[in-house]
Amino acid sequence: YINFNAGATRIKFSINLSGESFEDDEFYVKLSNLLRKHKPKGLSQRLMFEITESSHIKDIRRVSRYIQDLKAEGFFTALDDFEADDESMKFLRMIDVNAVKVDGRITTKILTSQPDLALMKHIIKTCNDMGKTIIAKSVEDKKQLELLREMGIALGQGFYFGELSSKPDYT
């Protein structure tokens, strides 16, 4: 769908993979086969895989191997809904993703909550020290975007950039 319907646009897509997806070997084999089939068409440059529901991950080594396989094929990987808690930090240490997507519950409060601003600074420092790209979720207005940029975050998603749509607009 991405290769044929998005045409020559620069639009990139993300697929969320739940912790449970990584527990299903059959799912991963089918996914790997599909990705290899479409790799020559430049799919890896347009598709990112996000690990969601990390609390459901039972075998972190398996997830780490799968993520390494995806990265070896040229795909961009991210931990979704990243917070500054023990669990997020554990996964950041043990799974070598390209990026973290900061949970919107932190991002939305950086202008009004000193604790959330401090958490965001901590996440930025940690991710920068580890060479990870940072993506801020739930960017809702220009002031928030400007502060995020001042803090060194170059990528974001949220209503400030566009409303949700059931059908992509490739223009």
Image (tube, rainbow, N blue to C red):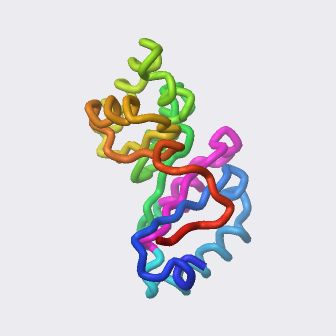
Residue 15 falls left or right of residue 151: right
* Residue 53, magenta (yes or no): yes
Residue 39 falls left or right of residue 32: left
**Residue under the image location 67 percent in, 52 percent down:** 18
Residue 105 falls left or right of residue 75: right
Picture quadrant of residue 4: bottom right
Whether residue 90 is visible to the viewer of this picture, yes or no, is no
- The x and y percentages for residue 40 are 44, 87
Picture quadrant of residue 74: bottom left
Relative to 32, say whether 19 is above or below: above
**Residue under the image location 42 percent in, 12 percent down:** 114
- The x and y percentages for residue 132 are 35, 45
**Residue under the image location 70 percent in, 58 percent down:** 21
**Residue under the image location 58 percent in, 54 percent down:** 63
Picture quadrant of residue 76: bottom left
Residue 144 falls left or right of residue 61: left
The magenta segment is 44-67
Q: Choose between 153 and 85: the one closer to the eye.
A: 153
- The x and y percentages for residue 151 are 29, 31
* Residue 26, magenta (yes or no): no
Q: Choose between 152 and 170: the one closer to the eye.
A: 170
